[in-house]
Image (cartoon, helix red, strand yellow):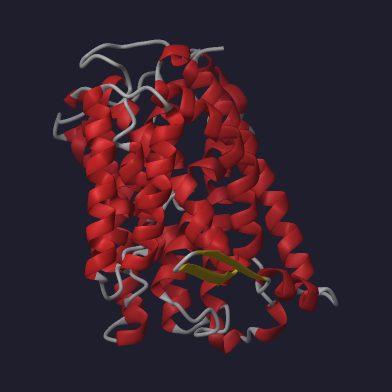
Amino acid sequence: MNALDEFIKKESSAGIVLIFVTIIALLLKNTGLSELYDAFLNTPVEIRFGALHIDKPLLLWINDGLMAVFFLLIGLEVKRELIEGHLSTPAQVVLPGFAALGGMVVPAAVYLYFVGTDSAGTQGWAIPTATDIAFALGVLSLLGKRVPVSLKIFLMALAIIDDLGAIVIIALFYTAELSTLSIAVAAMALSALVIMNRLGVDRKAAFLLVGVVLWVSVLKSGVHATLAGVALAFTIPLSQKPGQVVESSRSMLKSMEHDLHYWVAFLILPLFAFVNAGVDFRSISAEQILTPVPMGIAAGLFIGKQVGVFGFSFIAIKLGLAKMPQHSSMVQLYGVSILTGIGFTMSLFVNSLAFSDPTQFMFADKLAILVGSFASGIIGYLVLRSVKIEASKRAT
């Protein structure tokens, strides 16, 4: 099994796991077990080490701590793809790059159209710009050979660029007041990681130890702690010599990426979905669902994403700036564009940053993410399912 097949298999399986975990969370939140579910989320977890004191409920340890590991994996994938993967040449970047740009600009515009000048609501403009690659590939896995491999690669590359956009958005727009001391410590830790990379240090433990210092200092700085994972990832050496391409067993980056994939796919993301997807339908009225913020989120994911991704892709192809993915049709490209509206875990994550009070919109915002994501998944599946399988078989 090659690296691409292995990646798709893991992500597809993880997407299916996410569906079941979400259903369990919704059942717990909407039954007599709701108090037990809430108690689990609010379980206090405290760490003291000398003057260092971190005291957060379990929900925030998952969102700020475990999700840093998720972003570490994203950073490793992005670095590998940029150096030797599906984003290593300009020609490979053009189509998914245009698609990702449209998939961020148009959903944000749709959201802001619904929200208008509501200052509290405008903070959520980035919520519908995200794509959950695991969930999207999970839907594609249900279609088997109806979807050519080239479109799966297109979706993966788009999602990677989309993740890069999310990292920039979090850094620029969802940063609290900064602590100068913590920023200084983070800068020193990051400098140490860069020096270790340059000196050819080949011990994972050394990078991870300094990475923990980086995470704690970023956590205390006011910058969101998940960005420490990305920063650490970009200092992990792909090879010991510049320009050298090595096998996974001899590459620290590839080895670390391989080791983390199962933990992220089958523990961290499902746990994140479990603690964030619990929406109490009993507390949400029709009037709340139809308010600007939930409507903007749902419309941004379901309408904005497909219009942005497909529209920008179509323009790039027609202008001759990019080529259609091999053995695929416009209908298939449109179907995959719809699937990018599955924001789910990434949208829930951005939602937690945009609205610090989870009850601000009485959970209608989370419900909107679920509605927009599931609508995108179902409609995208049906569109791709409608394509004659004979045409798709020629791609394999």
Name the side, left or right, on which 81 lies relative to 281.
left
From the viewer's side, name the closer residue of 83 and 303: 83
Q: Which image quadrant is residue 364 in?
A: bottom right
Q: Can residue 42 be seen in this view?
A: yes
Asked whether residue 343 appears in the rendered view, the answer is: no
Q: Position of residue 293 (x, y in %)?
A: 43, 78
Q: Indicate whether 2 appears above or below 139.
A: above
* For residue 149, side relative to residue 280 (left or right): left
Pick whichever, 217 or 274, lies toward us: 217
Estimate the x, y position of residue 288 in percent, counting from the top left.
Answer: 55, 86
Q: Camera-side residue: 373 or 23?
A: 23
Residue at the extreme right of the image, as rendered: 32
Q: Is residue 349 above or below residue 306?
A: below
Residue 104: image location, x then y, percent: 30, 55
Displayed quadrant of residue 234: top left
Q: How many marks?
A: 0
Identified at 43% across, 48% down, the residue is 212
Q: Could you say where residue 240 lies in the image, as x and y percent from the top left?
A: 29, 16
Nearer to us in this view, 365 or 58: 58
Point 47% across, 20% down: residue: 4
Indicate left or right for 81 with 303 as reference: left
Quarter placement of the N terminus? top right
- Residue at 69% x, 77% y: name it: 281
Please report the residue visible at 31 percent of the width from the left and 41 percent of the height from the top.
161
Q: Is residue 314 above or below residue 224?
A: above
